[in-house]
Image: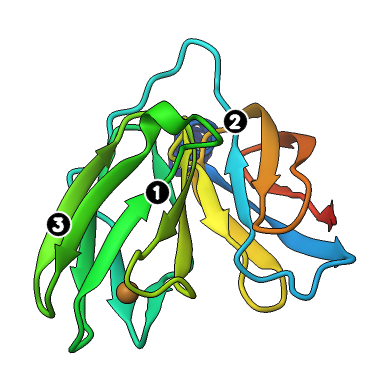
Amino acid sequence: MRLRLFAVQAVAVCSAALLLAGASLAGEIKGKVSVEGLKSAENIAVYVDTIPDKKFDPPAQHPLIDQVKMSFSPHVVVVLQGTTVDFLNSDPVGHNVYWPSISGNKKLSHNLGTWPKGEKKSFQFSDLGVASLLCNVHPEMNGYVVIVSTPYFAVTDKSGNYEIKNVPPGKYTLKTWSENGKPTTLAVEVTASGATADLTVKK
Ligand SMILES: [Cu+2]
């Protein structure tokens, strides 16, 4: 009798602990982006828009954009506002990095200069928006830095799939940005088990 009571208590304590753990567990937002009128569903930024009264510290680790085989790699990089990005040149020719504006604001244009293979330069992106990266030595090169206000973002793979990890439960606005498509917005509710959100990006 005593043993059984102990067992019941133990189960109750364990259940309570699991419930508590569940409440603080972060979920995933995942899904698939379909496109209408665009060649590919790859390289579409999917991110949680500004959360009222929430500020996030930029990561200590710098994302890297490589200039390799005459292209910016990755082609699209999403960062939290305030993040410092490292730009590396891996090609045996000199490459330049500049952006003529951030989301059309020419006051935020910047030229990092031109540098040889193996060298890196860094820049801290403090303004929200999209920087269109260009190289003034090779006009065919381009890439993008998408600066957002939360650390909850992803970029779609070749099939349009994406996965945003470690999102606390709550109601959010999910947005997309793509090179040639219109931005899209979707309300999502994340529970402890996450959320699935499929989106369509139109030209
Ligand atoms: Cu170049």
On the image, numbered disc 3 is attached to which residue?
A: 121
The kind of residue on which mark 3 rests is: Lys
Point out the tag, 1 or 3, that comes first from the N-terminus: 1
Point 13% across, 64% down: residue: 120
Ligand 1 occupies quarter? bottom left
Judged from the image, the secondary structure of the residue bearing numbered disc 1 is: strand
Point out the tag, 2 or 3, that comes first from the N-terminus: 2
Tell me if 155 is positioned left or right of 137 in this view.
right
Where 203 sits versus 189, above or below?
A: below
Corner quadrant of residue 198: bottom right
Q: Distance from label 1 to label 2 (Cα)?
A: 23 Å
The kind of residue on which mark 1 rests is: Trp
On the image, numbered disc 2 is attached to which residue?
A: 49
Q: Distance from label 1 to label 3 (Cα)?
A: 14 Å
Corner quadrant of residue 54: top left
On the image, numbered disc 1 is attached to which residue?
A: 99
Outermost residue, right direction? 36
Judged from the image, the secondary structure of the residue bearing numbered disc 2 is: loop
- Asked if the residues shown at circle 1 and circle 3 are in contact, with their CB atoms under 8 angstroms apart, the answer is no
The kind of residue on which mark 2 rests is: Asp
